[in-house]
Amino acid sequence: MEQVWILLLSSVMLFMVPGVQAQVSVNRTGCGLTKLCLETPDDCDPSGNSSCLFGSVAAGPHMPPNGVNLSFELSGQSFGYVALGLTVNATVGSTRFFICGKRNETFFFRTMSRNNTNEMLTAEITTAVDVQGALSGDVIRCLFTVGGLNATALRSSHSTTFSVLLGRGNVTDGGVGPLTVVLSSDPLDLTNPGSNVNTTATPPTTSGAGGAPHAHAGLLLLLGFLALGLLPTL
Ligand SMILES: *[C@@H]1O[C@H](CO)[C@@H](O)[C@H](O)[C@H]1NC(C)=O
Ligand SMILES: *[C@@H]1O[C@H](CO)[C@@H](O)[C@H](O)[C@H]1NC(C)=O
Ligand SMILES: *[C@@H]1O[C@H](CO)[C@@H](O)[C@H](O)[C@H]1NC(C)=O
Ligand SMILES: *[C@@H]1O[C@H](CO)[C@@H](O)[C@H](O)[C@H]1NC(C)=O
Ligand SMILES: *[C@@H]1O[C@H](CO)[C@@H](O)[C@H](O)[C@H]1NC(C)=O
Ligand SMILES: *[C@@H]1O[C@H](CO)[C@@H](O)[C@H](O)[C@H]1NC(C)=O
Ligand SMILES: *[C@@H]1O[C@H](CO)[C@@H](O)[C@H](O)[C@H]1NC(C)=O
Ligand SMILES: *[C@@H]1O[C@H](CO)[C@@H](O)[C@H](O)[C@H]1NC(C)=O
Ligand SMILES: *[C@@H]1O[C@H](CO)[C@@H](O)[C@H](O)[C@H]1NC(C)=O
């Protein structure tokens, strides 16, 4: 028996509100073409294998003046929570983690910032909307969108390249327990769904060489916002 929640929220950091029934399907359809996929073990399919820890990100259309939205999918087995993180450099600075978990068999979503040096997690307010979560046995699946940023955030954007981290952890009485990172990608251009796929023609992309021209300008706005939170020096 599967339980599903939809949470329609913005600018909140902890959601535990049961909502409307809906489908939450996470699978490999579109990997490398419409969405950038990361998973462990390699090439596992989250729809067919509960031991698969899977995350994806897709950039939406750019619609000025509202910027672009990044749509995430996350699926994996955990007694507590699964997490997807974005960071400029996984060994310095901080990582913004989006966490989907269960407490008392109820889905929750929250955002945490991890100090990459000492691995301390602190709660963080962020803009995430259209959060959907499903619990099925020990498997937690969720979808969420981050974005809707405007040009105000442009000032500090330089890069569309981030390392993506996947991990899991347990839920404690007080909140979320320590995070175990099980996958840490090389820096990837999030504008390019194929940036972690080997092709003979495409060398590794650098900042500004994304594959989606329409989304690109807006993504810079959005990532400028993300970078604000990720780079203490900005
Ligand atoms: C794969 O996921 C997409 C998006 O959630 C969904 O629309 C589609 O039906 C899924 N495909 C399969 C085969 O489950
Ligand atoms: C799930 O993935 C694991 C690790 O790759 C593999 O050993 C196992 O056979 C897979 N199970 C199924 C049902 O595909
Ligand atoms: C971003 O998401 C918000 C909330 O779902 C939506 O209102 C807005 O139209 C989206 N913007 C774009 C550019 O897709
Ligand atoms: C991350 O930062 C460390 C220390 O500054 C540096 O040695 C390393 O090259 C950086 N890694 C990347 C991918 O930039
Ligand atoms: C689960 O619910 C029970 C009863 O409402 C409560 O006593 C307990 O503290 C809850 N556990 C957690 C981890 O929230
Ligand atoms: C991260 O932790 C290190 C070591 O405790 C500390 O020196 C540094 O100031 C912390 N960084 C942030 C951004 O809190
Ligand atoms: C842009 O974002 C800033 C800060 O969030 C907000 O104050 C401003 O009203 C927004 N402008 C537009 C045109 O949405
Ligand atoms: C969560 O708790 C279980 C049982 O206490 C333990 O086996 C597991 O290693 C923990 N997982 C993490 C990621 O800490
Ligand atoms: C790309 O191919 C090289 C050589 O076969 C391999 O070492 C590397 O792991 C591959 N990278 C990806 C992302 O598949």
Image (cartoon, rainbow, N blue to C red):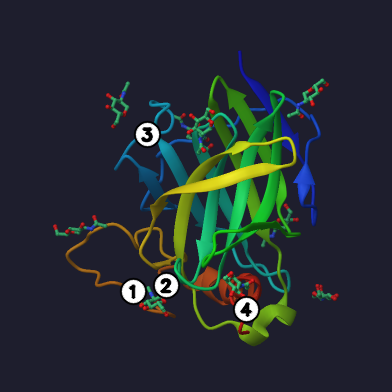
Instruction: Say above or below: 18 vs 90.
Output: above
Label at residue 232: 4
Of the numbered discs 3 and 4, the one sitting upstream in the chain is 3
Q: Name which residue lies at 61% across and 26% down.
A: 135
Q: Which mark is residue 45?
A: 3
Q: Nearer the viewer, mark 4 or mark 2?
A: 4
Using the image, tell me which numbered label, if any, was put on residue 205.
1
The quadrant of the picture showing ligand 4 is bottom left
Residue kind at label 1, given as amino acid type: Thr
Going by the numbered disc 2, the residue's amino acid type is: Gly
User: What amino acid does circle 3 point to?
Assistant: Asp
The image quadrant of residue 218 is bottom right
Q: Secondary structure at mark 1?
A: loop
Between disc 1 and disc 4, whose residue precedes?
1
- 88 with respect to 231 (left or right): left
Spatial CA distance of label 4 from label 2 is 25 Å
Kindly identify the residue that appears in the image at 53 percent across and 83 percent down. Answer: 158
Q: CA distance from mark 1 to mark 3?
A: 26 Å
Mark 4 sits near ligand 6, with its Cβ under 8 Å away: yes
Q: Are marks 4 and 2 in contact (CB under 8 Å)?
A: no
Mark 1 or 4: in front is: 4
Task: For mark 2, give the secondary structure.
Answer: loop
